[in-house]
Structures are given as structure tokens and as C-alpha cells.
């Protein structure tokens, strides 16, 4: 279920070459992977915060878009990376 949430809401911006991945690539300068599913250091609390509050170019996602249950599945999926 977490992968389905990721594919619908995150993948459009966070796949290689898209704005989210490009922004992370510039920020980390190769120290960390820019593609979220290649990361092994993502913490559920940080993922949840960024999804709900947004950041720099990342929009916020309301509970009407990503429910709390979907957010929990998403954070579990990403915290279990790399895939």
C-alpha cells in the first residue's frame, strides 16, 4: 500500500530527473541519493512532517489527499528503503 501511495503522490516529482530529485541532488551534492527510494536514512517522523508541512519547492499534502493511514503506509515504505 505504501508503494501505491508513493507512486501516486511522490513519484511524479521524486523520480530521477524530476524537480524533487533535482532539488535533492543539488542539496546533497552526491552525499546522499536524490531518489527517495534509494535512501536508507529516511525517518518516518521527518517524512510525515515534510508531507504535511511541505518544504522549499515541496507542496503540503492535506489529509483529504493523503490520509493518516496512507501516510503511515508511505512512511513505512520509505523507511524500509532502499528498494
Image: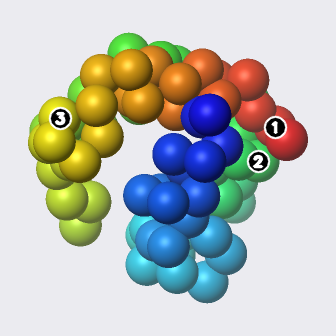
Tag 2–tag 1 contact (CB < 8 Å): yes
Q: Is residue 70 left or right of residue 66?
A: right
* Mark 2 surroundings within 10 Å by alpha-carbon count, few (fewer than 14), some (14 through 19), many (20 or more): some
**Distance from Cα at disc 3 to Cα at disc 2:** 26 Å
* Mark 3 surroundings within 10 Å by alpha-carbon count, few (fewer than 14), some (14 through 19), many (20 or more): few
> Disc 1 designates what residue?
82
Name the quadrant of the C terminus.
Answer: top right
Marking on residue 63: 3
Question: Given this view, does label 1 or label 3 mark the residue nearer the observer?
Answer: 3
Query: Please, which colouring scheme is shown?
Result: rainbow
The answer to whether residue 30 is above or below residue 67 is below
Q: Earlier in the sequence, mark 3 or mark 2?
A: 2
Badge 3 element? loop
Marking on residue 5: none
**Where is residue 20 shown, x and y percent of the image?**
44, 68
> Disc 2 designates what residue?
38
Name the quadrant of the N terminus.
Answer: top right
27 or 5, nearer to the observer: 5
The residue at 73%/23% (across/down) is 80
The residue at 59%/58% (across/down) is 7
The residue at 67%/75% (across/down) is 16
Q: Is residue 42 visible?
A: no
Amino acid at each position: 500500500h505504501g508503494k501505491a501511495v508513493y507512486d501516486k503522490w511522490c513519484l511524479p516529482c521524486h523520480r530521477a530527473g524530476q524537480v524533487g530529485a533535482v532539488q535533492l541532488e543539488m542539496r546533497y551534492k552526491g552525499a546522499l541519493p536524490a531518489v527517495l527510494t534509494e535512501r536508507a536514512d529516511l525517518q518516518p517522523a521527518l517524512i510525515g512532517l515534510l508531507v504535511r508541512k511541505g518544504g522549499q519547492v515541496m507542496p503540503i499534502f492535506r489529509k483529504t489527499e493523503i490520509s493518516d493511514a496512507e501516510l503511515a503506509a508511505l512512511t513505512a515504505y520509505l523507511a524500509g528503503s532502499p528498494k
